[in-house]
Amino acid sequence: MKNLLFILISFSIISSNVNAQFLKKAKVVNHSGDALYVGWDNKIELHCDAINIEDIKVICSHGTVVIKDGLFIVNIPYEEGLEKQDALLTFIKSENGTPKKFRRIKYPIKYISSPEVEFGGKTSGVISADAVKKTRDIRIYMENCPGDLTYTIIKYQFLYKPKDAGASTFQVHGASLCSNCEKMLVDPKAGDIIIAAKVWADITTQGEKLIPGSLILTVE
């Protein structure tokens, strides 16, 4: 009887040590960054060699969680006012048939911002002549954006209108300006106007999309 009791106590100690090591080593990585985004498949990765992901259940206070390709996919449906709230993720591991919480992580909830076309760090208004000379491409800017949401620019129309001359329009493929566009930007003057319109981009999970609106800048 004493031997059996000793074995049970030893097993309990070993099990506790293993769980303690698991808690210490388990690392949670949020592919979206420092927040969870509404309407996005937020990918949560659990790093720990001592556990099988299939043995872990994750509960989200504001959405659903499924396992796909070794990741926990957290989806938060749209609802007004969520940007003022936090989502709580609870990780649960089953031990001898009994579910036990071993990690809780809180993330702020954010809405994905609408994309804007950016040139020289500007999305509208005025731009310095020096910034115009140094810029050789357009980019997509989003104030709030998951870390794994990408925009690859496919094509756009670039228009340059000197203050005292007619406008020149170019069809550009890719994000980088064409050589003819660059020639127009060699000596920008105050009052010149830059426009990037009909910008098409390849967006993660969505394919090719037309970015709404146009970029309009005036050289100061």
Image (cartoon, rainbow, N blue to C red):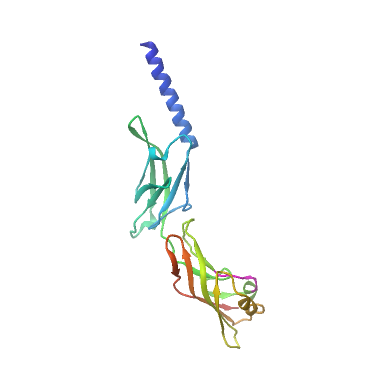
Q: Where is 79 relative to 73, above or below?
A: below
Query: Is 172 on the left or on the right of 20, as rendered?
Result: right
Residue 69 appears left or right of 185: left
Give me the residue at 48% from left, 71% from top.
200
The picture quadrant where one finds residue 179 is bottom right
Q: Quadrant of the N terminus?
A: top left
Residues drawn in magenta:
133-138
- Image mark count: 0
Looking at the image, the residue that sits furthest to the right is 187
Residue 199 spot, x, y in % from top left: 49, 72
Q: Is residue 2 left or right of residue 21?
A: left
Q: Please provide percent x and percent y for residue 214.
A: 48, 75
* Magenta stretch contains residue 181: no
Most foreground residue, 123 or 180 = 180
Chief SS of the magenta region: loop
In the image, what residue occupies the spot 64% across and 70% down? 134
Left/right of residue 190 with respect to residue 108 in the rendered view? right
Residue toward you, 100 or 46: 46
* Quadrant occupied by the C terminus: bottom right
Relative to residue 129, is residue 61 depicted above or below?
Answer: above
Q: Tell me where residue 67 appears, x and y as whole percent.
A: 38, 46
Q: Residue 111, located in which quarter of the rendered image?
A: bottom left
Of 28 and 173, nearer the camera is: 173
Kindly identify the residue that appears in the image at 58 percent across and 88 percent down: 166
Residue 185, given in percent of the width and then of the height, sits at 63, 77
Which residue: 45% across, 24% down? 14
